[in-house]
Structures are given as C-alpha cells and as structure tokens.
Image (cartoon, coloured by chain):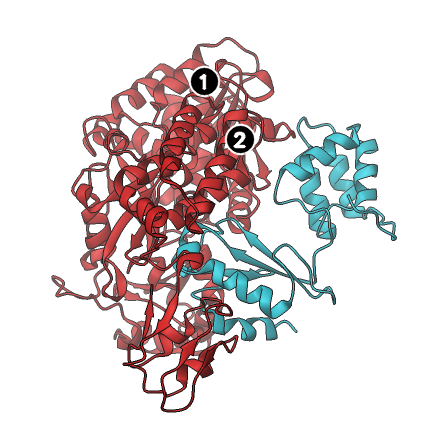
Chain colours: A red, B cyan
Amino acid sequence: MAVKNYILVCGGTACESSKGDDIFNNLLKEAEAQGVADDVQIVKTGCFGFCEKGPIVKVLPEQAFYVEVKPEDAGEIISETVIKGRMVDRILYKPEKGAKGDAFDIDNIEFYQKQYRIVLRNCGLINPEDIDEYIARDGYAALEKCLFDITPDQIIEELKVSGLRGRGGAGFPTWMKWNFTKQVESDQKYIVCNADEGDPGAYMDRSTLEGDPHSILEAMTIAGICVGANMGAIYIRAEYPLAIERLETAMAQAREYGLLGKDILGSGFDFDIELRLGAGAFVCGEETALLASIEGKRGMPIPKPPFPAVKGLFAEPTVINNVETYANIPAILTKGGEWFAKIGTEKSKGTKVFALTGKIKNSGLVEVPMGTTLREIVFEIGGGIPNGKKFKAVQTGGPSGGVITDKYLDTPIDFDNLISIGSMMGSGGMIVMDEDDCIVDVNRFYMDFCVEESCGKCAPCRIGTKKLMGYLDRFTQGKGEVEDIQKMKDIGEAMKKAALCGLGQTAPNPILSSLEHFGHEYMEHIEEGKCAAGKCKDLVHYKIIAEKCIGCTVCARKCPVNCIEGERKKPHVIDQEKCIKCGACFEGCKFDAIIVS
Amino acid sequence: MPVETEELKMTEGLLSFIEEWKDKPGNLIMVLHRVQEEYGYIPRNIAFELGKMLDVPLAKIYGVVTFYHFFKTEKPGKHKISVCMGTACYLKGGQDLIDELENLLGVGCGGTTEDKQFSLEAVRCIGCCGLAPVLTVGNEVFGKLTTDMLPEVIAKFK
C-alpha cells in the first residue's frame, strides 16, 4: 500500500533530549492503535535547526510544522492531521508577524526564509540511519562521477572554480590543500576529518554528522580518490555520542553497499574510514595537535611547516578538513563549481552555517549565503532579542574571535570582512549579547577557557593567557589600574606574533577586539569600580531606598542568607557584609525600592 | 593516580577490545576510552596492566590521561551531574546552576558527595545551546533550567 503521510520527527541532540525519542515511539504506537500504521511513515531525521522551538515534528504532505511537541501530543497528531487532514492548532508554529501565505508552510517561517541550505541540505529531511534515503537525494552520485567520469585533476579544477574555502576557521582554499597532498609522492596518504568541535557555543558539525553522516563519508572518499589515499580517519569528540553512533551505522551501511572498503563500486579503488575519539582538549582542533592525538599522544601542536599536506599523520601526506567543508563537496561535484561560485561574495563562496545562540529569540542552526548581514541573521532569522532588551554585541569565532557591535550590523559577513572589523569567522559560533551582559565578564569567561585549554608547550600562550586572566580577574573585583589596559594590549600583540599555534595566536583576540569597541566599559570597571550590567558580583551593591520601601517584608523573606532586617511597615536595610548579591530581593521587590549600584 | 585498595580485573570485553586494537598505530587513546567506559575512570592498576600489554611506559599513559579533560583518575559518583559551561549556557546562568548545586550537594565543582551518589562537574559545550542553560545527569539532559528547579532534578535520582 502506498504511504499517504510522512511524519518527520527531529532526532537532533537538543530535541532528543527534550523527549524526542518518546514522541517518536508514541507516534508509532498511536499509528498502530488508530489503525493507520500502513498509511504513514514515521521518520526520525537530523536536526531541523530551529532548536529554540524543539522538539519539532513535521507532517507531509500537509506541511504541518509542529513545535514544542510533547509525547502526549502524538495521539492527536495521528487522529487529526493524519486521519482527518486537519491541523492541531495548539502546537502549530505561529509566526510572530503577518507572514505571507499559509502560516504553516515552512517556507513562510521567518526563521527559514533567508536561509539557503547546502551543508544542511539533508538535515531534517532524511532519515540519517538509512543510506537509501541519502542515495535518493543524489547521495553518492558525486562519488560515482569521481570514480568513473572525471580525473583527479578535474576534481581539483572543479573545487578551484567553486572557490570553496575551509570552514574550520582560517578559510584556506580547499583545492590548494588537496593539490599539495596530491603532488607529493608517497605510498601512504591519509584523509582526516576534523570533527573536534571545541568552540563553546557551536554545534554545526555535530548536527551535520547527526543529520547527514553519509555526506562526510562520501566527501572523504572523493578526497581519497583525488589525492591517492586509501585510509581515512574521523576525529570526533567523545562528548557527541549520537553523532558517533550515526557515523558507525552509516559506515556499516556504506560498506555493505560497496561504497566504502575494498574495490568501491567495482572500480578497483580501495578506501576505508576509522573513527578516532577526541577526549576533550580544545587545542586538538588545531590540525597538528589533532594529528598527534590520533597518533595516541598528548595533543600538542608542532611548528609548521612542514604542513600536514606534506607531512601529516604518521609523517605521511595528509588532507585535513573540517566537517562543514566536506559536507559542501558532494554538492559542488554534483552541481558544478560554477553553481557554487554564484553563491556568496567575491572572495567567500557558498554558504556558512552558524550556531545562533545566547540572548536571541530563535536560537538554532542557520545556514545563510556568505554576504548576508548580521542584522538579517540576528533580527530577521533570529527574531531579535527577547524580553524587550537592547542588543549589545555579537560574538563570533568563540575564544579566538571578537565582538561585533551595532555599528557593523550591516556589514556583509564573509571571511575577509569579519577580519577587517576585528573578529573572525571561526567555526561558526554566533553568540548574541544584550544589555545585561558585561563585556569584562564575558572576556573573563573566554580567557578562563583559554588558560584551561592552553597545552603549555609554548611560553607566549602558557604565560600570556595566565597574565591576561589575572588582569581581568582584578577588573571584575574593582582592583584594576588604568595602565593595565596598555599592558594587556602589549601582551596580546606579543602572543599574536609569538605563540606556536592558532590557539595561542588568537587567544587575545576577544580582549583586543572588545577593548577597541567597549574600552569605556573596561574603564568603568577600573576607574569607578562599577559594572553597569551587574554581572561582576564584587562590584555590585544592593540598596533599599528608604522613601520607597513600605516594609512589606517580601525581600527579607526572599533573602537566602537573612541579611535584610527591618520591622513590618518600616523601611528595611540590607547588611552589606552578609549580602551574597544573589539579587533575590531585587527581583522580589514590587515597589522598585531596591536599586543596584 | 590515587592508590586504591581494590584490585580491579580486566573484563573479557575489554581484553578483546585491546586484542583488536593492539597492533594499530596510535591505539592508546581509543583503549583508554574503552577502559573508562568500563570503570567510569582510569584505575591505576588497569593502567599498569595496559602499559605492559601495549608496551607503553606508564609515564606516557599518565601523561595522556592527565592531558585530556575527558579522562578521570578518580571514581565518579553513581550519578554524574555535568553542568554545561559553553558560552550560551554561561550567558544564561550556567555559573548560577553550579553555585546552587554546590550548595545543595555540599561538594565543590569536580567533587563527589560523601555517600558517592553524585559527582558534580563543569563541562564544555554539549551542543544543546538552544536549551541553555543545560545540565546532564548521566545520559539525561535537562534544559532551560533555573536554580529553583535544581532540587527537583536531584530528587529524581535520590
């Protein structure tokens, strides 16, 4: 019997952890119980990207886009939408402003309107655990083409025409990397995929691996054909168990179909892939450190050159690209480099996936053409800042990047523009801050991360991060001095020049960039001992204004350390010595009688 | 590595995993992952055994184990509470969750309660930024948390 309906259930990590699995099982049970099990196919897909509204369930062909679904909604989805073709209004996504056309058509949801999906082309559409669904969406067509129709030189040429640059952060042209390795004579070469997504606040690669694992396997195999390698390794974070599981399933299926392993598709070409687990070290995102880790050693970088393209894993020539870069490759080879080159800006082609998080209404994964402005991403796709708060800045590039202020909201985003305004593309973390966030505090967070993650091999990074951290610590305690700012700049510049690897060279970036845009906020901390956002607890004091206090005793009852005293109907007083600055009294007061200073 | 009183034996599953990986170059980290999966940490005597079996000096094993955050040298509590400290979670109050949990459990971050029921740690981004702030207890994820929800989370595992 032909299947009448398809129900797509998001199986990304964020949705799975909000009971996505139960929803999936309940839908199966309900379809069975209501006698429509044969009419409907229920598929667990990869991430839809709209994590803010998860878990997400989509019913085709009705195009019903259900958000924040609960396991108990399953019965109604089957009885209403599948059987009667009606919408379950309660969980139907409702656009905020007057959207064009049908409210429930996915193309009319603002979150998706400006997006252009190449990397995430299959995420949320196919079942990542079924190779046939990938093949049905032109999967492995590029591999076939590379095996039988075009030469390795033509592969390089196609990538060159496409203008694809590495998505790991530095933006090095992919065709050049491949070409270096191709030109080296060696019996053994390796293809490595960097899936050690360490940037805190970024999860693009995880979603790609979870939602479309075959695209990575296909691209790595193509890289193998191109440069003459027959071994590949995917270095993936152990913290991503679902992605690991899906990759393992995908690899087993690809081997079974003769798309991986010995004599691929009868061509005589052998290529196989192994998974290697990372163990929680940010520095392993740096390619030489990553290779050391695959070799079973401490993940410490080594000076370049020689570049991995010439001397990499086990001292053999190695192509190393990140997940998002690989995910683009099958699409480029199927549709042609010229197609890809039409998307994006002059020097940055194609799209970029960002993990849009922080103080934003619609957090989630967004894929946009290069050249899209920050304003479009934050205010149109992201829906702006929640709770009527004011936009402060966007942080891109994580601990290696910088802040972008409202002045630059209309700058088209690409590799070069972001560098020219003092930030960087990074791997794609995009964190929105509002007026409640303190720049000094956020930078302290990033520097704390860098101190922790510095491998300690070179002095500029090992000592520099620690020194910078010391200054920030003092600022947040109100003990900073004006001269410290210049000292921080000097240390930062020295690290940029002298540190051994990318981690150390970029670690001072968040500070240098925020000093430029938010210098006044640092000065406020230093000179006035004031934290306007109220985040630096040592600088915050809560006070009760006697004239406004009516003595309702709410604050005294809310205080967890009993430091507020006063008689009923008389003004209360906070004991500053005992106060732990938790803010409970401030939030509890209905008469605005408590102020933060 | 701390000294233990009990001597742990290698399980069948672990032995066959080591056998499978023994001759592959760069096997150490993969084997350590398997050991931690088995015991929840890297026990000292197992590390000794491993050194002999893989022909790797114990110093090298210790070096690798201490380099990577993921590997533990002490036995964790029955329930592992991991509070995400990725940037999104930090901005949305991840630190407040840790402070409150320290308060509720009476242990510092990185510690284990006396009854060995809970261990508390701060972890790097677990990739659920849409649910920030997030923590996990074992494999279960709790998102969009506020501090007053924490007693309930803990109670679930008591």
Q: Say which chain tag 2 marks.
A: A
Dot 1 alpha-carbon crowd within 10 angstroms: few under 14, some 14 to 19, many 20 or more = many
Instruction: Judge from the rendering whether residue A120 lies leftward or rightward of residue A289; answer left or right.
Output: left
Disc sitting over residue A463 in the figure: 2
Instruction: Judge from the rendering whether residue A140 lies leftward or rightward of residue B7; answer left or right.
Output: left
* Identity of the residue furthest to the top in this view: A185
Residue A583 visible to the viewer? yes
| Residue at image location 45% in from the left, 80% down from the top | A558
Residue A231 visible to the viewer? no
Give the x, y percent position of residue A425: 32, 35
**Residue flagged by tag 2: what amino acid is it?**
Ile
Task: Give a yes or no on whether discs 2 and 1 share a subunit.
Answer: yes
Asked which quadrant contains residue B62, the reply is top right
Sequence-first tag of 2 and 1? 1
Secondary structure, mark 1, is helix
The quarter of the rendered structure image containing the C terminus of chain B is bottom right
| Residue at image location 36% in from the left, 58% down from the top | A51
Give the x, y percent position of residue B68: 62, 39
Q: Say which chain tag 1 marks.
A: A
Asked which quadrant contains residue A316, the reply is top right
Seen in the picture, residue A137 relative to A268 is either above or below; the reply is below
Instruction: Judge from the rendering whether residue A312 lies leftward or rightward of residue A227; answer left or right.
Output: right
The residue nearer to you, when weighing A301 against A476, is A476
Secondary structure, mark 2, is helix
Residue at numbered disc 1: A227
